[in-house]
Amino acid sequence: MASQHLSARSRARGFTLIELMVGLALGLLTTLVIGSVLVLADGKKRTLSEGADAQANGALALYALQREIQMAGYGTSINPAALGCPIKGSYKDPSAPADTPAIPFTPVLAPVTIVNGANGAPDTITILQSRKPGFSTPIAIASDHAKTDNFFVVKSSLGVAVDDLMIAVPESGLWDASHWCTLFSVTSDNAASPTDTTLSNTRIPHASGGTNKWNRSSVFPDDGYARNGYLLNLGSMALNTYSINAGNDMVVTSNTAGGVNSTAEAVFSQIVNLQAMYGKDTTGTGTVDTYDTTTPTTAADWQRVLAIRIAVVARSNQKELEAVTASAPQWDVGAGSTISGTSACHGDSKCLPLKVSHLTDWQRYRYRVYDTVVPLRNVLWNSAKTP
């Protein structure tokens, strides 16, 4: 009986200290393994998710730019000789205080204008096109227009409506320092007399005063516009400028018939660089043979611009726990590229580095590059036409 009682007490005494320490060690090791697996899985999930976000933002930003550049020059590029003509306009809201100065409006008559960012900083792209519903055709000026006149005599005002923005272009589109393009707004008072201030089949008025925001005789050349010049109908106008702000958003600033320099509107987030180049035909063959960032200064130079090449750099939203990017993203511009600053990459191809080092902790983010070449189809279609 005593032997059986002793055996029962022995079996009920529990784990030894060594057994507890071994079990604790195994538990800690298991926890460590499970934790490592979870961290790795979460990192993979975050990388895939943020990569998808960057891909969506970059692809949509590129598509938006491509779509608008495809329409660049609609209604404004009818005469190649007029490309590059400096436009003068003046905007002032009549409801503003009398001592409020008018805002100068000085773009150029070109489908796309690129402002090159310094030292690899993002570029700025400005796109001009008519927003006239239905159609936009040039209108021939039938009589000389003096600087102080408040109407144009035209051969036909077909398609013109009150409040349309229009651009007066010198005879044959030939512009110089004394003969520029002028922006004005169509008015009509429907008065029985004088009929010159009423919009008609052969009259396009642009009287100042009242609620008009654009019309001032000071923006017209001193010797006005000779007959055989012409008018371009912008309708409500679309002059949109795309850039990258300090918050790494691609933003658009618009100029319309209702105002100038609207508040920049963020359209796509985490776009950290935007680069653009003019595609030029320097040999007269009708095909692009070089790309550069030099903005043309003459009509002849503008006529050589047949396409725009753009690259967008998108960044992931989430900062990684460690460095994942060792060098600047590369823009592959093709094996036969003559673009300055390229270096060999991807075998026989050539690449341009796209700056991201200006960003805080730039090495702890992932980047994707999206690029395309957009033909200026309105320029190409009108290259052999004159109004």
Image (cartoon, grey):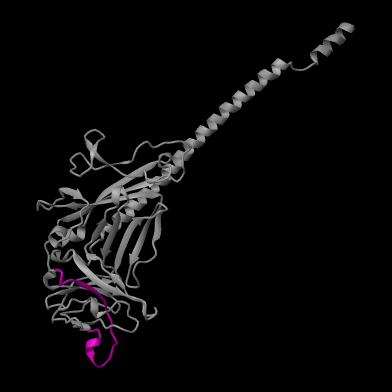
Q: Answer above or below: position of 334 versus 38.
A: below
Does the segment drawn in magenta span residue 124?
no
| Residue 1, quarter of picture | top right
Magenta stretch, residue numbers: 176-201
User: Residue 293, image x and y in percent?
Assistant: 22, 52
As drawn, 235 above or below 244: below
Residue 235 rendering spot, x and y as whole percentages: 28, 72
- Name the residue: 40% across, 54% down: 246
Horizontal arrangement in the rendering, residue 142 relative to residue 334 (left or right): left
Residue 221 occupies quadrant = bottom left
At 14% across and 56% down in the image, what residue appears?
304
Q: Quadrant of the C terminus?
A: bottom left
The residue drawn where x is 63% and y is 21% is 26
Q: Is residue 358 visible?
A: yes
Residue 387 can be seen, yes or no: no
Q: Is residue 198 magenta?
A: yes
